[in-house]
Image (cartoon, grey):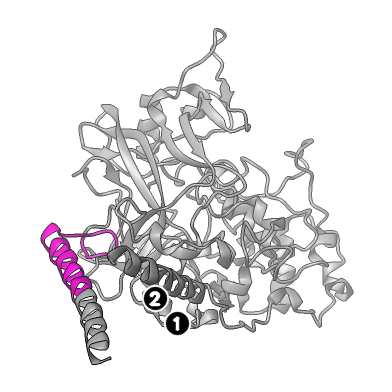
Amino acid sequence: MMALLVSLLLPLAVLLLTLKVAAHKGTPDVVDVKLKAEHISSVDHSQFEILQQDFETPHDVTAACLSCHTGRDEEIMATAHWKWEREEEIPGRGVVSVGKKNLLNNFCTGANGNNGSCMRCHIGLGWKDKSFDFADNRNIDCLVCHDQTDTYFKQKGQGGMPATAETANSAYQVPDYPYVAQNVGLPKKNNCGICHFYGGGGNNVKHGDLEEALLSCTKEVDVHMAMDGPDMACIDCHTTERHNIMGKLYSVSSANTNRIHCDQCHTTTPHNDKVLDNHFEKVACQTCHIPIYAKANATKLYWDWSSAGLTDDHGNGYSEDDADGNHNYLSIKGNFVWDDHVKPEYYWFNGTVDHYLSSDTITEVPVKINSLFGAYRDSTAKIWPVKVHRGKQIYDTGNNTLISLKLWAAEKGEGAFWKDFDWDTAARLGMEYNNRPYSGNYDFIASEVYWPINHMVSPKEETLSCTECHSRDGRLAQLNDFYLPGRDYNKSVDYAGFGLIFMTLIGIVAHFFGRLVAYFKNR
């Protein structure tokens, strides 16, 4: 009888569960968004006489732009894109200045002092050293963000300048300034991507979810930027007012301000399912909708600086690549570990971050270059998918601080590690440039940096299933500060539950037989 009862009830239970899961995968509300890509300019810049001159420098182009676009320079020079730093409050520290200008990382250790190379991604012109004038509006590079011709590029090693007659080569030609200036418009994906896709020395090195594949991808890579989908541009989400671009990069930011949230377009109840929509309170949309990142090309997950500096028999640096063309080893940088289709790690995150500041001493290993704040009992925190980049980098054993390295120089003999492979000289010069003390003693130490994942959103059919989190070996195994149904259990409670189920079944069976007896007796 027990077997008969189970055989009757089990199909019903499976049917109900199937219907519930199907409801979870229900069609979301349609989102009506006006895309910037659909914008048609009412201005033909080719008709402006001031843009038809033979410009000698990009500074002259900027002056011409500002002669009409008055006040735009003041807007730009107030942004973090220009300053590479901002005043933000870090819990427990107060208000500090944080940004690419002064923070360290475990990729190339830091931008300041490596200006010729790193400042190629600054929106200014010619930030080669400390003499760069942030107050001179002619130093703004208007074309790098607004070029529509795909012919304007900043040259490597020139501190953010395009090629000149003296520096031009087969890879970089002097831009046709009148042609570019007459063909400007709203920033496209590749205007943003030229820096945000290639940070850290190559495509997808840093972010893992931002790379050149997004320029022409399918929905499987990203439902928003897909060519066979809405083909959204960066500025469709990263909306801009007075040149202040919405969005946060938490490797160089700290405050829970100026952020983009999915519910700005999708609302807080997009699933047509109460159970799923209730998850929004403690689970970021990205957690379920970005089950993997680095979908097209691999991203760098580990960087060991301690092995850098090896040379061949002729004293020259060399490289070793894997089958996909990713560097396994570079003399100038060390060993790497890459991977694609990576499952994120998961952390509580409330939108605020701590940073290792240049004045800090090392208090833990691995050194946390940044730390995401948040916990279950934090009402503003949610579970978030994160890329963790781990590494081993140089530090000052005497002062117990991370070292700012001088990596780049135009020629050998200037003390840059990438040219001379001399750790001590590169450390001394890098610390000197950044006005930091150096004891003369160094070693290498493990470090971590945390990158919240926001891009490469999957189609709804490929979102996480319930059991990928609600199971004992699921994705959230490391988040143990809260009770998660399906993952957490107590033997006493389980046994009590099984006992109640068993007693209930006995009661049902007894009731069934009682009704049978009563039926036949009454006949």
| Mark 1 Cα-neighbour bin, 10 Å: few <14, some 14–19, many ≥20 | some
Which corner quadrant holds the N terminus?
bottom left
Q: Residue at x 42, y 61 (%)?
A: 85
Residue 218 image position (x, y, % from top left): 69, 58
Furthest residue in direction front, as rendered: 523
Secondary structure at badge 2 equals: helix
Residue 255 image position (x, y, % from top left): 35, 69
Residue 456 image position (x, y, % from top left): 56, 59
Judging by the rendered image, the residue that carries numbered circle 2 is 280
Q: Is residue 321 magenta?
A: no
Residue 147 is marked as none
Cα separation between marks 1 and 2:
7 Å
Q: Is residue 349 left or right of residue 322?
A: left
Residue 72 image position (x, y, % from top left): 62, 76
**361 versus 274 height, above or below:** above
* Residue type marked 1: Thr
Q: Is residue 11 visible?
A: yes
* Residue type marked 2: Phe
Q: Is residue 158 left or right of residue 260?
A: right
Residue range (magenta): 481-506
Mark 1 and mark 2 lie on one chain; the one further toward the N terminus is 1
Judging by the rendered image, the residue that carries numbered circle 1 is 268
